[in-house]
Amino acid sequence: MRIAVYQPDIPQNVGAILRLGACLGVPVELIEPFGFVWDDRRLKRAGMDYLELADATRHRSWPAFREWCEASGRRLVLVTRHASLPYQRFAFAAADVLLLGRESAGVPAAVHDAAAARIAVPLRPGLRSLNVAVAGAMVLGEALRQLDRFPLPQKDTVP
């Protein structure tokens, strides 16, 4: 299981996603170009000291990322508001890559069409979207639950 972000605009969201990946042991794929400078202080503030612990790979372009996906046998699962299938009803697989779109524009039609599956986080009528890091965390949590891949504490802390 991996999480990918398509041409992100907002460094704080990337920092939060990298922190999420570090904490849950999930690699993060970042597809360039970015809408910010990589060493942006806001990225570092959101990611805190977890950035060094994140397993992150930067892909220079969408075609380079697609080539990596195909070569590694990964299924691309797009998280989009333009899907009818709720993420809770989707059967995740260990080789999936959850693709999150650009905060300002989502993904272009060619990227949408390249996904093997498209899933949505259901929202109340009239509302457009969640923060990309929040939506990614929700979907990743369900995927890890289905795959029984949550990190477990060393000791049972429940009395």
Image: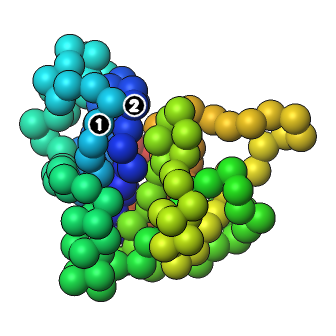
Task: Say left or right for 125 vs 76.
Answer: right
Q: Which mark is residue 9?
A: 2
Let me know if residue 107 appears in the view. yes
Q: Residue furthest left?
A: 52
> Identity of the amino acid at label 1?
Phe
Q: Quadrant of residue 90?
A: bottom right
Q: Secondary structure at mark 1?
A: loop
How many numbered marks appear?
2
Q: Which mark is residue 156?
A: none
Residue where numbered disc 1 is placed: 34
Q: Earlier in the sequence, mark 1 or mark 2?
A: 2
Q: Quadrant of residue 11?
A: top left
Could you tell me which residue is drawn at 76 percent across and 50 percent down?
A: 122
Q: Is residue 25 above or below residue 49?
A: below
Alpha-carbon distance for marks 1 and 2? Answer: 6 Å
Q: Quadrant of residue 99?
A: bottom left
Give the camera-side residue of 67 and 125. Answer: 67
Disc 1 to disc 2: CB gap under 8 Å? yes
Q: Crowdedness of circle 1 by 10 Å Cα count: few (<14), some, many (20+)?
A: some
Q: Residue furthest right?
A: 125
> Identity of the amino acid at label 2?
Asp
Could you tell me which residue is drawn at 28 percent across and 26 percent down?
A: 36
Let me know if residue 92 appears in the view. no
